[in-house]
Image (cartoon, rainbow, N blue to C red):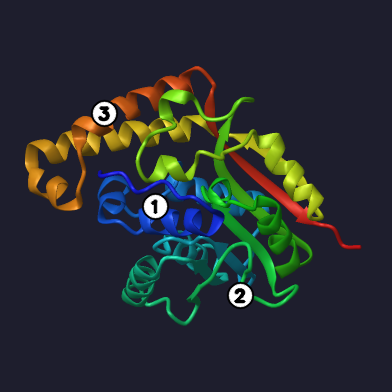
Amino acid sequence: MEPLPLPMDPEETKSCCAAAYGRDAVALLLGESYHPGGLALTRLLATRMGLRARDRVLDVACGPGATARLLALEPGARVDGVDLGEHTLATARAETERAGLSDRVRFLRGDAERLPAPDAAYDALVCECALCTFPDKAAAASEFARVLRPGGHAGITDVTVAEGGLPDELSGLAGWVACVADARPAADYSALLAQAGLATVTTERHDGALARMIDRIEARVRLLRMTAPERLVAAGVDTDALAPYLDAARRAVADGRIGYALIVARKESG
């Protein structure tokens, strides 16, 4: 896909990433769920968090709402999704109405660093493959803590990097990789959460989920090139430009330079 212009300040960064994830190319290449591990990893995250029926849950950077809808069905939570992308939210609302879940799921436009929610409003919060994109991660973590009730849990899944940051050969990838250029080691995410009053209780590596996502994108591109190349053209996907980055990402996962982590943190009661 054609590169998005690299942002110059935090607000432009957030707008850039919201625009990237709202593009037709992302839906075409990633399918319904935009994060590694898909809904299977979301189910595991819900289990690790101990989510229950009727819990109030906030899905931060909710994208097209796949996670919010799943949690409304399993375990039957009441879910609010927050995202910056207007087009993405319109898709989320339409898909949720089609699924008959509009009475249990609603979507709000908002910034993770200034969440549109009152203090202690939620039993749980999830944020999948998005904390790495936030320019002010400490502010976002503080907001996570603010909107959780005491004893509530924040569940994070996100891209991780080895010390030293994203590999150089990936730093120029258009769109979505530009948004994860500030991914951190898992320990750094836990430290940010701890500073906000969220104590990590679970950390798991799921690097294989990232490797499988890369393979799935490559297979999807290969299939579309054979069966529906016009869809790739219409979505602005340059398959020749994309291939070297997929190869580089696969090597980086194999070498342990990038990965994927699941983190659950609990808000302190005091």
The answer for how far apart the CA atoms under marks 1 and 3 are is 21 Å
**Residue occupying the point 56% across, 66% down:** 111
Secondary element at tag 1: loop
**Residue occupying the point 42% across, 65% down:** 85
| Res 261 → quadrant | top right
| Amino acid type assigned to the residue bearing label 2 in the image | Pro
Question: Left or right: where does residue 239 sit relative to residue 127?
Answer: left
Question: Left or right: where does residue 176 sit relative to residue 57?
Answer: left
The answer for how far apart the CA atoms under marks 2 and 3 are is 39 Å
**Residue occupying the point 43% across, 64% down:** 65
Mark 2 vs mark 3: which is more N-terminal? 2
| Amino acid type assigned to the residue bearing label 1 in the image | Ser
Disc 1: CA contacts within 10 A as few (<14), some (14-19) or many (>=20): some
- Which residue lies under the disc numbered 3? 243
Name the mark nearer the viewer: 1 or 3: 3
Identity of the residue furthest to the bottom in this view: 103
Question: Left or right: where does residue 89 sit relative to residue 218?
Answer: right
Secondary element at tag 2: loop
The x, y position of residue 98, in whole percent, is: 31, 75
Instruction: Tell which of 230 and 32 is nearer to you.
Output: 230
Secondary element at tag 3: helix
The x, y position of residue 241, in whole percent, is: 24, 32
Mark 1 vs mark 2: which is more N-terminal? 1
- Which residue lies under the disc numbered 1? 33
- Which residue lies under the disc numbered 2? 116
Identity of the residue furthest to the front in this view: 8
| Amino acid type assigned to the residue bearing label 3 in the image | Ala
The answer for how far apart the CA atoms under marks 1 and 2 are is 24 Å
Name the mark nearer the viewer: 1 or 2: 2
| Res 205 → quadrant | top right
The C terminus sits in image quarter: bottom right
